[in-house]
Image (cartoon, grey):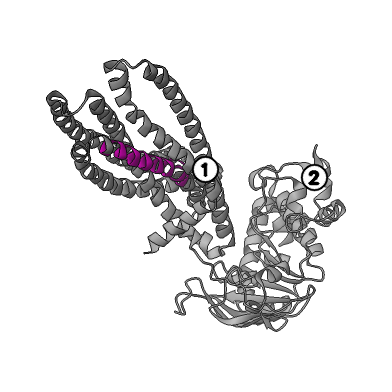
C-alpha cells in the first residue's frame, strides 16, 4: 500500500503538466491513427488499383499516403518534444523536492547517510525516473492507442480471423510481467551498487591527500574495481532479463502470424475473402505485434523507474525529529543567558546508561560570560554545545534561553542568535567575499571589510590578485589552515550573533597561525555569551569559568587558579599538558629548555 501511495504521488507530479500532457496525447492519438489508417488503405490499394485498375483511386491514394506520413511525422515530433519537456519538468521538481527535504533534515540524518549516496539519489536515481516518464510513459500510451486502433481494423476486416490473431496476445503479456519483475529487482540492486560507488568516489577524491601520503593507491584501485564489478554484475543480470523478453515475444508473435496466414490464405484460395482484405489484415497484424513487443521493453524501463522512485521517496518521506513549535515564542536579538537544566542526551534517543552521552548536566551561563569546556576526547563537550542551536534535541531536561525552553522558539530564530567556528573550517568553492558574507548575504562591502579586518585576514586578502573576488577552491583548498580559520571567524563576526560556539578552533594550527587566530577570536568574543571547547589549556586563561566534563558529567567548574588548587581532573589535565609541552620544547631546543629548568 505504501508503494502504491508513492506511485500515486509521482502521478501528482505528472498531472501538474496536464496541458502539455493533453496535447501530447492528441499527438499520440494522431500517431496511432495514422498507423491504423496505413493498414486500412492496403485493401483499396490492392483491390481497387492493382486488381480493378481504378485510375481515380490511383491518383488519390499517393496523395493520401503523403498526407498521412506528413501528419504522422508532425505528430511524432509534437509527442516527443512535449513528453520530454514534461519529463524534464517533473525531474526538476523532484530534484528540487529532494534537495529541499535533504537540506532540512537534522544532523543525525547526515551522520547515518553518506554524501555520495545522497548525491546518487539526486542525480542517478532521478534520471532513471526521467527515462520512465519521458520515454516509457510516452511509449506506453502511444502503443496502447496504436494497439486499440489496429485491433479495430482487424476486427472490422475479419472478426473470425481477428480472434485467432488476438488469441496469442494474452500469452505475449506473460513475459512482459515476469521479466519486468526481474528487471525491477535487479535494477534496485544496481542502483544501490551505483550509490555505493558514488560514495566511494566522493570519499576517495576528498581524501586523496591521505591516499597518496600512505601509499594506498593500489588498495583504493582494487576497492574501486570490486565495486565496479558489483555494478557490472547487477547490470548484466538486468540486461539478461531484458534480452530474454524479445525472443519470447518473437516466438509468440510468429505463432500468431503463422495461424493468420494459414487461415486467411485458406479463405482467399476458397474465394471467401479478397487478397486486399487479407493483406490489409496482415499489415494490421504485423503492425499490431510491433507495439506489443515494444510494451515489453517499455515495461522494463517502467520497472527501473519504479525502483528508482522507491529510493527517491525514501528520502522525500523522511521526517525531521527537530520540529518547530506550533506557536513559536519570540526571542529578542541581544545578549542571552543560556541554562542547561538537568540535561541528558543520547544519540540513539534511549535512556540506557550505556547509550547516554550527557548525564544530568546543570550549567547556568550569564550574558557575556565566556565558558571554557575541557576534558578528554569523547567526554561530551561537542555534544553539549550542539544542543544549543538544536542540532539535536535533549533526551531529558531542557536547554533554556533567557529562561525559555529553546524548543518553544522557532528554529530559524534560535539559530539566528548562534554563530559557530569549528576545528575544521567549512568553506565553499566561491569568492572570499561570499564566504565571509555567507550568513548575511545582504551585508555591505564595508561590513565585509570590517569583519575581515577584525579577523586579521584583510591584509592577506589585499595581496591576492583578485582580492575579495578570489575563488578559494573546494573547502578552501587554496588557503592555509590559519587563513581558512580566520575567514570562518570573519564570517561569524559578520553574522553578529550574541551566542558564540568555538569548537577547538585553534587545535590544528601552528604557533604563528594560532597567535593570529587567537587575536581574532578575542575580537569575536567581545560582549558575546561564548562556549569555548579547548584542547590547549593555555588558550583559555581569559575564560569567566572553566567547566570540566568527564564521561558526560560535569565534574568540576571554576576559575583556572581555583581548579588547580583543587588538584582534581583539571589539575591532572594541566599537568599532562605541561609535561607534553616541556617534552616538545626539549625536542625543539634542548639547550634552552635545560637552562630554563
* Picture quadrant where residue 264 is located: top left
* Picture quadrant where residue 511 is located: bottom right
Pointer 1 residue: 23
Up-down relation of residue 102 to residue 231 (above or below)? below
> Where in the figure is residue 326, as x and y percent of width and height?
62, 77
Which mark, residue 468?
2
- Name the residue nearer the viewer: 24 or 4: 24
* Quadrant in which the N terminus appears: bottom left
> Where in the figure is residue 53, as x and y percent of width and height?
31, 15
Assign a secondary structure to mark 2. Answer: helix
Up-down relation of residue 82 to residue 563 (above or below)? above
Which mark, residue 268?
none
Q: Is residue 269 left or right of residue 209?
A: left
- Residue at the right extreme, as displayed: 446
**Distance between mark 2 and mark 1 Cα atoms:** 51 Å
Assign a secondary structure to mark 1. Answer: helix
Give the residues in magenta: 129-155
Residue 58 colored magenta? no
- Name the residue nearer the viewer: 114 or 184: 184
Main SS class of the magenta portion in the image: helix
Q: Is residue 555 left or right of residue 261?
A: right
Tell me which label, 2 or 1, sits earlier in the chain.
1
Amino acid at each position: 500500500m505504501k508503494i502504491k501511495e508513492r506511485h500515486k504521488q509521482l502521478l501528482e507530479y505528472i498531472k501538474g503538466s496536464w496541458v502539455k500532457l493533453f496535447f501530447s496525447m492528441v499527438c499520440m492519438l494522431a500517431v496511432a491513427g495514422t498507423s491504423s489508417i496505413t493498414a486500412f488503405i492496403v485493401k483499396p490499394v490492392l483491390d481497387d488499383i492493382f486488381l480493378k485498375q481504378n485510375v481515380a483511386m490511383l491518383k488519390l491514394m499517393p496523395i493520401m499516403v503523403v498526407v498521412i506520413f506528413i501528419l504522422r511525422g508532425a505528430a511524432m515530433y509534437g509527442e516527443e518534444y512535449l513528453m520530454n519537456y514534461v519529463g524534464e519538468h517533473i525531474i526538476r521538481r523532484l530534484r528540487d523536492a529532494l534537495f529541499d527535504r535533504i537540506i532540512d533534515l537534522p544532523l543525525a540524518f547526515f551522520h547515518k547517510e553518506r554524501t555520495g549516496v545522497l548525491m546518487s539519489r539526486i542525480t542517478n536515481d532521478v534520471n532513471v525516473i526521467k527515462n520512465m516518464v519521458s520515454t516509457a510513459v510516452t511509449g506506453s500510451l502511444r502503443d496502447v492507442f496504436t494497439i486499440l486502433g489496429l485491433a479495430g481494423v482487424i476486427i472490422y476486416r475479419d472478426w473470425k480471423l481477428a480472434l485467432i490473431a488476438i488469441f496469442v496476445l494474452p500469452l505475449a503479456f506473460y513475459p512482459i510481467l515476469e521479466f519486468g519483475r526481474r528487471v525491477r529487482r535487479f535494477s534496485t540492486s544496481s542502483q544501490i551498487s551505483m550509490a555505493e560507488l558514488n560514495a566511494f568516489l566522493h570519499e576517495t577524491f576528498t581524501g586523496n591527500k591521505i591516499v597518496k601520503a600512505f601509499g594506498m593507491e593500489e588498495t583504493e584501485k582494487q576497492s574501486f574495481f570490486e565495486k565496479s564489478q558489483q555494478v557490472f554484475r547487477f547490470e548484466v543480470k538486468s540486461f539478461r532479463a531484458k534480452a530474454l523478453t524479445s525472443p519470447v515475444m518473437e516466438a509468440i508473435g510468429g505463432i500468431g502470424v503463422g495461424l493468420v496466414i494459414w487461415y486467411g490464405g485458406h479463405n482467399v484460395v476458397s474465394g471467401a475473402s479478397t487478397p486486399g482484405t487479407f493483406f490489409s489484415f496482415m499489415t494490421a497484424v504485423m503492425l499490431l505485434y510491433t507495439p506489443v513487443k515494444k510494451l515489453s521493453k517499455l515495461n522494463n524501463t517502467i520497472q527501473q523507474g519504479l525502483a528508482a522512485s522507491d529510493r527517491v521517496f525514501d528520502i522525500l518521506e523522511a521526517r525531521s525529529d527537530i520540529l518547530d513549535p506550533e506557536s513559536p515564542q519570540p526571542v529578542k536579538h541581544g545578549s542571552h543567558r543560556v541554562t542547561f537544566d538537568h540535561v541528558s542526551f543520547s544519540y540513539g534517543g534511549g535512556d540506557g546508561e550505556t547509550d547516554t552521552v550527557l548525564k544530568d548536566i546543570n550549567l547556568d551561563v550569564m550574558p557575556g560570560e565566556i565558558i571554557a569546556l575541557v576534558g578528554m576526547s569523547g567526554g561530551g563537550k561537542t555534544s553539549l554545545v550542539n544542543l544549543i542551536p538544536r542540532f539535536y534535541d535533549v533526551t531529558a531536561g531542557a536547554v533554556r534561553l533567557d529562561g525559555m525552553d529553546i524548543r518553544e522558539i522557532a528554529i530559524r530564530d534560535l539559530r539566528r542568535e548562534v554563530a559557530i567556528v569549528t576545528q575544521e573550517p567549512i568553506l565553499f568553492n566561491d569568492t572570499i567575499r561570499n564566504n565571509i558574507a555567507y550568513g548575511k548575504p545582504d551585508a555591505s562591502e564595508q561590513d565585509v571589510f570590517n569583519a575581515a579586518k577584525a579577523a586579521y585576514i584583510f591584509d592577506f586578502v589585499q595581496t591576492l590578485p583578485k582580492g575579495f573576488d578570489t575563488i578559494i577552491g573546494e573547502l578552501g583548498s587554496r588557503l592555509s589552515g590559519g587563513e581558512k580559520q580566520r575567514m570562518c571567524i570573519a564570517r561569524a563576526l559578520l553574522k553578529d550573533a550574541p551566542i558564540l560556539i568555538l569548537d577547538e578552533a585553534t587545535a590544528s594550527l601552528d604557533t604563528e597561525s594560532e597567535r593570529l587566530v587567537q587575536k581574532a577570536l578575542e575580537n569575536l568574543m567581545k560582549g558575546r555569551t561564548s562556549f569555548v571547547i579547548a584542547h590547549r589549556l593555555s588558550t583559555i586563561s581569559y575564560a569567566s569559568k572553566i567547566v570540566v566534563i568527564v564521561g558526560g558529567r560535569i565534574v568540576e567548574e571554576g576559575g583556572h587558579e581555583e581548579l588547580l588548587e583543587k588538584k582534581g581532573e583539571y589539575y591532572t589535565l594541566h599537568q599532562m599538558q605541561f609535561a607534553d609541552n616541556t617534552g616538545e620544547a626539549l625536542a625543539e631546543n634542548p639547550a634552552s629548555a635545560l637552562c630554563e629548568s
